[in-house]
Amino acid sequence: MTSVKYRAVIVEDEELARGVLRELLADHREIEIVGEYANGFEAVKHVPELKPDILFLDIQMPKLDGFEVLELLSNKDDMAVVFVTAYNEHALRAFEVHAVDYLLKPFAAARFAEALDRAKQRVGQKQVAPVVELASAARPQGQYAERIPVKDGPRVHIIPVAKLEFAEAQDDYVSLASEGKKYLKQGAISSLEANLDPNDFLRIHRSYLVRLECVSKLEPLSKDSYVVTLHSGARLPVSKSGYAKLKAVLETER
């Protein structure tokens, strides 16, 4: 009798799709399904506690998509992730470039077995997918993020990009200012910048990214330093290069 060697979790919003994965995994006695979740919020809450070896993760889910779920999981580097997706072939090149396992719906048992074998080989190898970069690469050209998920203890906040005023780099985190509140998100400000529309946001300083429509006034602070005042009253430092870029944008809009 084959003993259980791998713990698996399924995150998929469609019951029929979860059933297909359960049925296929039943033929692999070395796999134990330790959890199933129909939405991203429950997955983010419970997956870290379950400590699975393999995560079957749907991408196209409401509220939180698969990329957002993986980004928020604290133990993502301990799991082999098999994305389950209906993305077209063009988008799938992003997965191949970043060496992420995926199953393209609908998939056959043989294709599932191949993905499972690769996942089992990757367990324990600490191969972390660059989640933000992967999401960006898989997104259609010219399309940018519309929301930013932030984990705050057991809670998950969803910040609409349209309501993001500015972002500030703080060591390994980014502070996001939105509607009078600030949210701390792990990650680099450069990664955030790459996912935002450059027509709406501008890097004014190595530590600051600002929404252009929130800018009220730009002025010198001293001989070699500048400051921008936002409509909310917030005042942010502006680097010399940031000043030149922001000044050019403001003059173009006049």
Image (cartoon, rainbow, N blue to C red):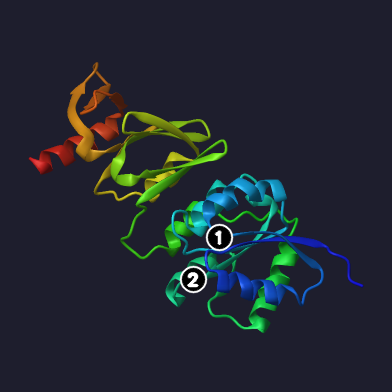
Q: Name the residue under label 2.
A: 93
Which residue is painted at 58% across and 80% down in the image? 107
The spot of residue 151 in percent (x, y) is: 52, 40
Residue 148 seen: yes
Eye-nearest disc, 1 or 2: 1
Label 1 sits on a secondary structure element that is loop
Q: Which amino acid does label 1 sit on?
A: Ala
Residue 69 or 214: which is nearer the viewer?
69
Q: Name the residue under label 1.
A: 38
Say which quarter of the image contains residue 167. top left
Say which quarter of the image contains residue 30. bottom right
The spot of residue 182 in percent (x, y) is: 40, 30
Q: Which residue lies furthest to the right in this view?
A: 1
Q: Residue furthest left?
A: 254
The spot of residue 74 in percent (x, y) is: 62, 44
Cα distance, mark 1 to mark 2?
27 Å
Within-10-Å neighbours for mark 2: few <14, some 14–19, many 20+: few
